[in-house]
Amino acid sequence: MPLSPAADREMIHTRTMDLRAYRRSDGLYDIEGHIIDVKPQTQHLPVSHRAAGEPVHDMWLRLTVDKELVVRSAEAKLDVGGHAYCAGVEPNFAELAGLTIGQGWNRHVRERVGHELGCTHLVEMLAQMGTAAMQALWSDREHEREALHHPEKRRLPPAMLDSCFAFRRDSDFMRENFPLDYEAAE
């Protein structure tokens, strides 16, 4: 159910983020992210100009991961950056290779491509891409599907332990659904 507006308003910015996961024929997975920022009014940037409705940002990022969520390669492409200079950041995202999506993912991403080493918009999208990768691979794990009807055999992937309120090791949800990973609070 969409939220209802609190007052009369005018739309001034749209950000669209599209995340997709693909199973590859070589056993790896591609997680692709695409982000587009559009404004309904003309934008005058320091060294460029965007007409109303023209993208201010149009950026792509691909992570290739294995079944253990280890990044094998990463590729960025800025079709439209805030400034032409921004495209120079593209090769830096290859530095994500070797990272594991899981606990500490966002911190490790910022260490490798954060701040002056990367692009704020792509770094922000990487948090969502990590979650998309976990969702995609979760649904692709045969042994987890078999255990769906047998809680006593279920294991939560280590990257998901303590990743949210429900997956806290001491939660009632874990006690009932993943007893092998449950740890009573002290």
Image (cartoon, rainbow, N blue to C red):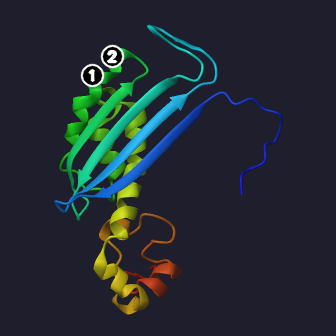
Q: Position of residue 142 (x, y in %)?
A: 29, 78
Q: As rendered, which of 176 and 141 lies closer to the eye?
A: 141
As helix, strand or loop, the secondary structure at mark 2 comes to helix
Q: Label 1: which residue?
A: 88
Q: Is residue 37 above or below residue 19?
A: above
Q: Residue at x 36, y 69 (%)?
A: 138
* Tag shown at residue 119: none
Q: Label 2: which residue?
A: 85
Identity of the residue furthest to the right in this view:
7
As helix, strand or loop, the secondary structure at mark 1 comes to helix
Question: What type is the residue that disc 1 sits on?
Answer: Gly
Q: Is residue 74 above or below residue 176?
A: above
Q: Classify residue 147 as left or right of residue 57.
A: left
Question: What type is the residue that disc 2 sits on?
Answer: Tyr
Q: Residue at x 59, y 25 (%)?
A: 39
Residue 70 visible in the current orientation: yes
Q: Classify residue 41 as left or right of residue 103.
A: right
